[in-house]
Amino acid sequence: MSPYLVFVSNVTVLLAFCYVIIKKAVGGSRNKLPPSPPSIPLLGHLHLLGRFPHRSLRDLHSRYGTDGGLLFLQLGRRRTLVVSTAAAAADLYKNHDLAFASRVPSATVHKLSFGSNNVSFAPYGDAWRRSKKFAVVHLLSPRRADSFGLVRAAEAAALVAGVNLAAVAGEVVELRGLLYGYSNAVVTRAAAGTAGATAEKMKQLMVNSTALMSGLQLEDVLPDAAAKAVRWATGLEKRLDRQVEAWDELLSEMIAEHLEKKRDDVAGEEDLLDVLLRLRKEGTAGLELTDDRIKSIVQDMIFAGTETTSVTLEWAMAELIRNPRAMAKLQDEVARVSNGKPTIEEDDLSRMEYLKAVLKETLRLHPPAPLLVPHESTTAAVVQGYEIPAKTALFINAWAIGRDPTAWGDAAEEFRPERFLDGGGVTGIDLRGSDYQLLPFGAGRRICPAISFALPALEIALASLVGHFDWKLPIGTRLDMSETPGLTTPPLTVLRLVPECKTLLMA
Ligand code: HEM
């Protein structure tokens, strides 16, 4: 028999084996689980996810889910609990956060992230707890986030300068590239003091790695050994190895440079890599900071912080273009508060209430990670009387929760930043994880540790864009508000706009 036929017959036997296991998992405990749609062999409900899982899951929930906000799916090999209402999210976070504090394992992510020795993908346990505390206290604390004010100011000025070139030439700008460049520069400079050529190399690595990590993973349907065999047979394992080597080379260079203090950081502040190396030397990290762990953490910050920030900014601009009254109101606020100064200053941001409301409203309607980052349970849990076994994945549908009329009223689908202002109905609702109807950063143990870092980066960029320029759609084009499928969901059509310099504020 040819090696190909041997391979195919092995995979067939393994698929049949999976089918029996899945059937047992679905059938054996059906009575105790939340309701599910009808399933098919092997895939379970995987085929029902479609291109936009957050949208399909909302529809599936409305057909099959409980009034309590739960739905149960068998996604290939993965048992999955889906939460689609604020009340169910509150119950999960308040009563079962610990049980669901781990991550769904992925061989690809594990390999690309230096063994998941980071915060985002480490399984729940002592090492993750220490890394998270470490990130919250040393890397992303409000004080540390403040210390990157100069980096944000410099990168916001570069963003304005880029737009200005197009404005002076009367050209269209593709905002996505500029916003990605801005976010990537802020995060990489804060994480590793690096900009320019190294940041460019890193950007390319991130794009390639994201492509490998997105979408259905082989282990979602095949047992681990079979998935590995398929990765090997299809050349995927080799591509992964090459990608890991490239990351390793880049991050090793950065560590060596930092150790030799050869770098030239204009901000003059410690970057996150400096902090990690200093704490390793002092022995006060409470965690063994091997080179691999340091690489994994630095890479994690850059990954977690770049696209989330740029996607939010692109949606904010798209919503403001679609809602000219909101744009005018924001421009008025920026002009009034900055009072004729030539640049927007961070100290002024705290007085821009409408700006904050615009960003909350953007994150409500367009959370960049619509299903957050999936969690996994480490122990069995009884949720609303249903018995959820250990090793069940948890999807919190932050996108559906943010648009739920029960929480947001009849105008839930509309862009109305005023709702967050005095008398607006939901004044005081915040996005830091204690109001379960607004969860763009998650909540509980796995909440994003970088909210204090992310918000000023979003605010200064948006205030600068609308403060310095008026914006129009190019003649003959229409705004496309549909999404790109993927881990994060930017607009499907790159936002192309014509900027016009405002006279009040000059770049
Ligand atoms: C608009 C900006 C951002 C948004 C909307 C966002 C959102 C999120 C979400 C939804 C999660 C997963 C929460 C969960 O598992 O339930 C997360 C985790 C995380 N984020 Fe962010 N994020 C943003 C910016 C950043 C930035 C700038 C950084 C770093 C510089 C960062 C670092 C992390 C890390 C390390 C985790 C993993 C936390 C853990 O697993 O315990 N994020 N973020």
Image: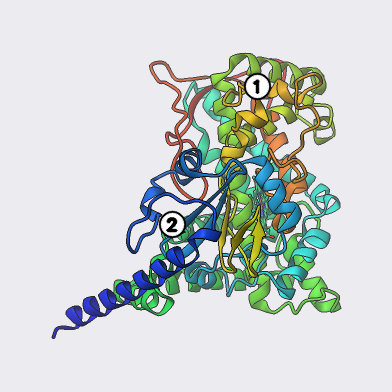
Residue 467 position in % (x across, y down): 69, 23
Mark 2: amino acid = Ala
Q: Which residue has dot 1 on it?
A: 416
Give the quadrant of residue 416: top right
Locate residue 384 relative to residue 221 in the image: left or right.
right
Residue 457 position in % (x across, y down): 71, 41
> Which quarter of the rendering shows the N terminus?
bottom left
Locate residue 422 relative to residue 191 in the image: left or right.
right
Report, in whole angstroms, how far the alpha carbon at label 1 lies from the one at label 2.
34 Å
Instruction: Give SS at disc 1.
Output: loop
Q: Is mark 2 within 8 Å of ligand 1?
A: no
Q: Is mark 1 within 8 Å of ligand 1?
A: no
Q: Residue at x 85, y 34 (%)?
A: 347
Going from the N terminus, do you reach mark 1 or mark 2 first?
2
Mark 1: amino acid = Arg
Give the quadrant of residue 41: bottom left
Q: Residue at x 55, y 73 (%)?
A: 248
Q: Which residue has dot 2 on it?
A: 211
> Which quarter of the rendering shows the C terminus?
top right
Q: Nearer the viewer, residue 464 or 217?
A: 217
What sort of colour scheme is used for the picture?
A: rainbow
Above or below, 177 relative to 477: below
